[in-house]
Image (cartoon, rainbow, N blue to C red):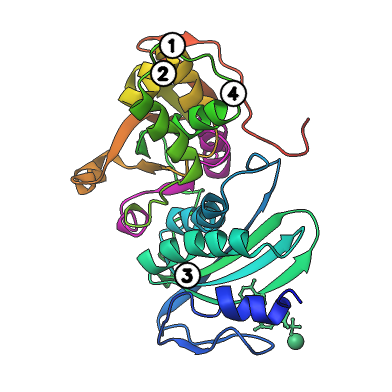
Amino acid sequence: MPPGEFALIDRYFRDIGARRDVRVGVGDDGAVLAPPAGQELVAVVDTLVEGVHFPAGSPANSIGHRALAVNLSDIAAMGAAPAWALLALTLPRADERWLEAFAAGFAALARAHDLQLVGGDMTAGPLTVTVQVLGFAPRGEALLRGGARPGDLVCVTGTPGDAACGLALLQGRLRTPAMADEAALEVLRRRFLYPTPRSTAGPRLRGVASACIDISDGLAGDLTKLARASDCGVRVDVTQLPLSAPLIAIAGRAAAEHFALTGGDDYELCFTVPAARAAALAGLACTAIGRVTEGRDITVCRGDSVIEFSHSGFDHFAR
Ligand code: ADP
Ligand code: MG
């Protein structure tokens, strides 16, 4: 007889992480958690659906990593530190090799963040993974989307565009140069399969950034959301975009810019900083790509000339 639901939970999900502030974890009807005094809870949840958020047949290890990483990215964008997670897993069948690889991908990232899996759910159906993460930020200090002011610098961590290019490669949608550098291809594919949530940068931006958002639907679209929430405009200079060497080598400069502006799945942080606080960014791997402006326009330019650019970011219900 194949192992039942409870045996599977016991085997794969009972021992992911260990924290002292968990009074009751996996095994009871609910988790009992003790948030530290003086901190506010920050709660996020994200769902990954096979064929929508990742290609059918993606490695289970990557799916486990990504399901947690996308939530850790939201926590980082709030300037918070992650603590606890809940996992609701819908699987077509109880495939133990798949579960083992999935749990390993999830657990490696959880341990790296001192995060404990404290509960969840398992059901049969089309492959769907929902993760909720709870974290903390000191009272009143969480980073929001709405604090940008005209004159602030617009900055981004890492090298956006890599993940979208990696996904295009995984899906065979991109014509690659003959003799394409295999190491560069692998870097890009891994940036989709194993995104790195900016968990150190997020909390460091508390008291520094005026607004922050993570890039899940594309830099231009997510920056538009930040600008709308702040009731400001932004002006971004494509010549300032931090494009990675592998991205330029594989996609070429023009497509690289397009991936960086519109591709999703980067899980980099895009934030604004008053110029007077820019010195506090020293040592943080980020790049200034533009300015917050008066008005409500989202302007993309190349040096001094404005370029036509239409985008809206990914919207599940718009197409
Ligand atoms: P209930 O029926 O009360 O909702 P379950 O019997 O479904 O609870 O789950 C038993 C315990 O296992 C609960 O503590 C639940 O949070 C936990 N759990 C269930 N599925 C998962 C999972 N995929 N990962 C982690 N914990 C899980
Ligand atoms: Mg119950």
How far apart are the alpha carbons under marks 2 and 3? 38 Å
Q: Residue at x 35, y 12 (%)?
A: 303
| Residue highlighted by disc 1 | 177
Q: Amino acid at mark 2?
A: Ile
Q: Amino acid at mark 1?
A: Pro
| Residue highlighted by disc 3 | 135
| Residue highlighted by disc 2 | 250
Q: Residue at x 44, y 71 (%)?
A: 115
Q: Quadrant of the N terminus?
A: bottom right
How far apart are the alpha carbons under marks 2 and 1? 7 Å
How far apart are the alpha carbons under marks 3 and 4? 37 Å
Location of residue 269 in the rendering, given as x and y in whole percent from the top left corner: 42, 44
* Sequence-first disc among 3 and 4: 3
Q: Secondary structure at mark 3?
A: strand
How far apart are the alpha carbons under marks 2 and 4? 13 Å
Q: Where does the magenta region start and end?
A: 202-231
Q: Amino acid at mark 4?
A: Gly
For discs 2 and 4, the disc positioned in front in the rendered view: 4
Q: Is residue 256 above or below residue 212?
A: above
